[in-house]
Image (tube, coloured by chain):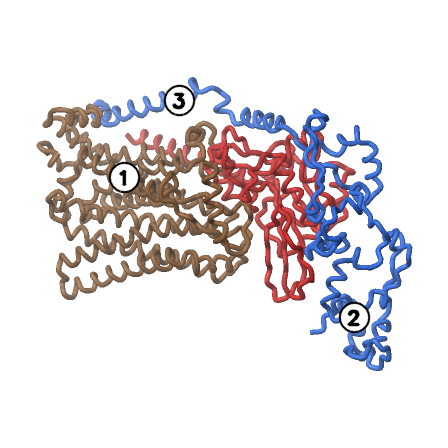
Chain colours: A brown, B blue, C red
Amino acid sequence: MTNEIFKSLSEILPQITGFIYPNEIEIHWGMLIVVYPYITGVVAGAFILASLVKVFNVKEVQPLYRLSLLTALSYLLVAPLPLLSHLGHPERSYEMFLTPQPSSAMAMFGFVYAWYLMAVLLLEIWFVYRTDLIAWAESESGPMKWIHKVLSLFSKDRSEGALAFDHKALKTITIVGIPSAFLLHGYVGFIFGSIKANPWWSSVLIPIVFLFSAIVSGVALVILLYMVITPLTGGKINMKCVDKAVDFLFYAVIVDFSLELVDFIHRVYQSEEEIKILSEMVMNKLFMSLVIIQVLLGMILPLGIISVTKIFKRRFSLNEDLRKMLYFISVLLIQFGIFATRWNVVIGGQMFSKSFRGLTTYKMEIGGIEGLLYALVLLVLPIVILTVLLKILPPWKEMKGEGNGKELTGEAPLGGMHAPEA
Amino acid sequence: MKKILERMPDALARLLVVFIGLAVAGAFVVIVLIPKPLKDVKIQWADAVKREQAKPVKYAGFHACAECHDKIYDKKKTGYHRDLSCETCHGPAKAHTEDPDKVKPVIPQERAFCPQCHAYNPSRPRGFPQINPVAHNPLKPCASCHNPHDPKPPTTPKECSACHGEIARTKAVSHHVQLECTVCHQAPQQHKISPRSVKPTKPQTREFCGKCHAKDAKDKLARNAPRIDLANHGEKYVCWQCHYPHSPEVE
Amino acid sequence: MDGRRKFLRNALAFLVSGSALGGVLKILPSSALAKEASRTGKWYGFGVSVDKCIGCTRCVEACKTENDVPKEPFYFRTWVERYIIRKDGEVIVKAVETKPEGVPESASDREVLRSFFVPKLCNQCADPPCVQVCPVGATFQTKDGVVLVNEKTCIGCRYCIQACPYGARYLHPETRTADKCTFCYHRVSQGLLPACVEVCPTQARIFGDLNSGASVMARFRRMNKIHVLKPALNTEPKVYYAGLDGEVR
């Protein structure tokens, strides 16, 4: 075990440029910690998209409401996994709850996570699905009946008063949920932004940049999932809904892009002692992932594509299939872009020496716990969980519903709803 | 009121039961089941301090050696190595103090050992005794000429460079390469025996350098020397405040 | 209905503001506490005379032996940096290797402006950022001012390694926990000197109680112009440097 570590470290030695402190050769936060903020970002973003429907009453995106909640839940369930796996002693992780240090940003993870999972996401989903669960439990048989029965906590009340309460509760939860989603991802940004030793991370803007990139990634992913899942289940993509969601995505990307630009200009203009080594890093080691993937492919290109669709849609009423394809390409590019953003923050922050005199290198492994394959597993796992959730809590009716301004939740799904294709 | 009670419980009451149940279970686990040392960081710190203090010592410290090796200790006390711990050269000796017969500290004999400190290295502070191991009596073990417990030059050095290696090497690549040290410094014989008690002379005035570098200098060494007018060339300062005489900057 | 709502709102406001206040108070820098501790009892510090260091790395070897630090050149509780500052302004820095270098440099390079060695170790900050970020309290400051790692509770998250501005920490490859200089706490508690100070042949390293009236440490701090590393980060290091060059970071 240790010999393997020594071997991989020796392989890095010849790639070091300039001077780094001798303990800095090893990059301690690798692939897993890149995956972690990406996943929590999707959670926060998907939840914000859901809130658009409930709080801001954007009726067009109603078909995405349940899907985005389930997406948020399935990603949130996976979020602690990369953290746990990267620990030197995962078996001691319970200490986070027994002796949390109030001064540590990281110690709050368990509590922020538990709050978000229990008090926001699960509650909201429960209230959304409560009446459906009752209906399903009544009309089904076999294990599914019992699953739904247990999930509904054996509640049976579908009176008008109960529905009204569901509605009110949902509104409250969403209102609490938006700051919570901000907290969840702003907090992840704070973990990095509060490290005064590291000028690449240490910035008040980092939590905010994290937040907006989270919204971007979450919204884009839900659109992507919607565009993939709907045809698979035999539905028809509601273009009004997708258009509206892409609209929001467009503005979110613009805000995210401007924030990152402000951060960049600020750094270059202030030009403090670390600027030389940071620019060397950006121009050499991060050129591909930052300039090409994050900025050009992940931001400017999708912005361009979406702008084109916007212009042509109005003038020539761009054909729907072409629009679908362009949207699909854009949201896919954005996913890669945001993942690259996480990569550049996490890995970039450890490539330069805190002596500001040299750079080390990140050597990606393929196998092993810090390796690429495991990271891919972690990235696919939420999709698997989502598939299961879609089976148990199908949102089809809503997704296939017309969604053009008709309020569907609350009073609509009364009885007789079958789980399709189950 | 009755109406509230009727519709609240079904959604809220069920949730409350679940949440209170979870909270009670969690509290029970944390408060009752988990032993105190796992929860109290102060206890953990006290343990950690004790564990840290109990770690084995490997270097015995300079006092320990004197107990048995008093003769060497006394000899070392007066020499240039008086500030060195025995373990600087002989390595960790705690095990030796516990079982003197079985465990013996190392006695470094290979020629590569002393140069770790005494090989010439331009980053080393000025005045620290340094030699060039390639040129300095090659292949001869250091201890054959120098007693490591009271190191001094075996014979009175003839060359200044024997001790002032850094200066000699700097001068060797400078414009002053042709000048003997004695052109500028008078070193009494006593300096070679007891370097700190009697010091060589150093030039004191601008006129000394002027013997070669003044525009009317007549010294025979001065044939190709750059000339200046002593009256108006950097008048407030003496020469060596701008020019390092062993490697005068003239570019 | 109205009363209940009011109560709920008040309760919520109380909870939120209460926890926020408590959180902020605890997050505030603990330096006030640290300084108070420094007036009573022992408060250890370290002195480095840059002008005395000859770069022999006896300290690095002794440290690795004394503290079972892996011998591989990726883990150091202390190390020595060599600075070569050239006339064109270029600064060349290397960590001095513990193996003696083959042929010594002979003639001095005329392009070199100045050159020197700088020993580095954990600064045992009075206000340590590593302690601040540890989520489980596995790294902590003893009452005599030494920052230790509890290897029985460290979860190996490496947040402290990220938070240390000096690169003084590493993840021990065998224990998978964070590790760092302890000022040789086991030796110091017995009245011995840290191993690196013990073996330093030129007294470039000294160690002592900062509260003592007359000691090597007291004299060192009295007679020298003192500098610490990265003072702008407000970590209040307790490793004091005499004759430190501005290029050293």
CA distance for labels 2 and 1: 79 Å
Left or right for A184, reference B107: left
Farthest residue, direction front: B139
Res B81 visible: yes
CA distance for labels 1 and 3: 30 Å
Tell me the element at label 1. Answer: helix
Left or right for A337, reference B155: left
Q: What residue sits 26% from the left and 27% below the top?
A: B12
Residue C200 x, y percent position in the rendering: 71, 42
The quarter of the displayed image where residue A81 is located: top left
Q: What residue sits 82% from the left and 67% below the top?
A: B180
Camera-nearest label, 3 or 2: 2
Look at the image and tell me in which quarter the N terminus of chain C lies.
top left
Left or right for A164, reference B224: left
The quarter of the displayed image where residue B68 is located: top right
Residue B220 x, y percent position in the rendering: 85, 78
Q: Upstream in the sequence, badge 3 or badge 2? A: 3
Q: Which residue is mark 1?
A: A382
Q: Which residue is mark 3?
A: B27
